[in-house]
Amino acid sequence: MQEQVLSQNANEGGKGFGLPLTFFSEDTDEKKASPKNNKNLKDWEKAEKLFEEHLNKIEIPFFRVDQKPSTKCDVFKKKNICRPDYIIQTKNDYFYIDVKQRSNINYDKNNYKRFTIDQKNILRLFHFQEEFHQKVWLAYIDNLQNTDFYFVSISKVFEYFSNIITIILRDKYFDHFHEIHNTLVSNKIKHKLWIYIPEILFFNKLSFDKGFYKISDKDFYKDEADFHKSKWETTIDNMILKFIK
């Protein structure tokens, strides 16, 4: 199985931190015990510890964002904005990461495995990205006994949520579509909707050099080259002959 870079660091948001560093605290807890079997940790705490282990293993620098209520600024409270859990650095940019521990379940006949997130969480993270011009990604872990993480940008999740809401509303509430749609995609709505994100939208690898990417089970570029070779026929050969004469 070969690693195929199907996508690189997505270009959402702006560059740099853009926020006072007092919002962040680097995790200095050097516990040697694995979080997998630590009975004193909740599942979300284990997921975050495993994410830190994963980042250290693949040599990606990171900061842990202080999530204590006392450190949340008034602007975030007023605008109902959620703080991501980590800031990581890759070769090309910085990313804000929110870690989720969720089961990756097949919910329907389409055989798509899906991760869940509620629309409130989507909107709070998306508005953080929009407000501060940063790149926000989600890191999901399905099984706490391993460190297989799945990554998706909050922009992609928001686009997915917005599109399915649009289709549903237009079919059923056409006369009030715009009013209802604008309410559902605002971060002030009180009702909670669970969104089931298909695994196909996720990246399954992260590295310092490549950023977020996918591993393909087949030789993606070889197949693509064979396809274009059949389309180009002798054209490319004639082009190359001009250079080597």
Image (spheres, rainbow, N blue to C red):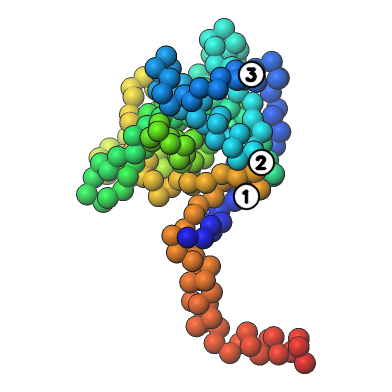
Residue marked by disc 3? 28
Q: What's the amino acid at mark 3?
A: Thr
Q: Determine contact: label 2, label 1, CB under 8 Å.
A: yes
Q: Position of residue 40 (x, y in %)?
A: 42, 14
Give the residue drawn at x 66%, y 48%.
Answer: 209
Q: What's the amino acid at mark 2?
A: Thr
Residue marked by disc 2? 90
Residue furthest to the bottom: 245
Q: Nearer the viewer, mark 2 or mark 3?
A: 3
- How far separated are the C-alphas under marks 2 and 1? 8 Å
In the rendered view, does 106 fall on the left or right side of 100? left
Indicate the secondary structure of the residue bearing disc 3.
Answer: loop
Q: Quadrant of the rendered structure where residue 54 is?
A: top right
Counting other residues with Cα less than 10 Å from the Cα at mark 2, is it few (<14), some (14-19), or many (20 or more)? some
Give the residue drawn at x 28%, y 37%.
Answer: 173
**In-front residue for pair 50/200:** 50
**In-front residue for pair 42/203:** 42
Q: Determine contact: label 2, label 3, CB under 8 Å.
A: no
- How far separated are the C-alphas under marks 2 and 3? 21 Å
In the rendered view, does 80 fall on the left or right side of 27? left
Mark 2 or mark 1, earlier in chain: 2
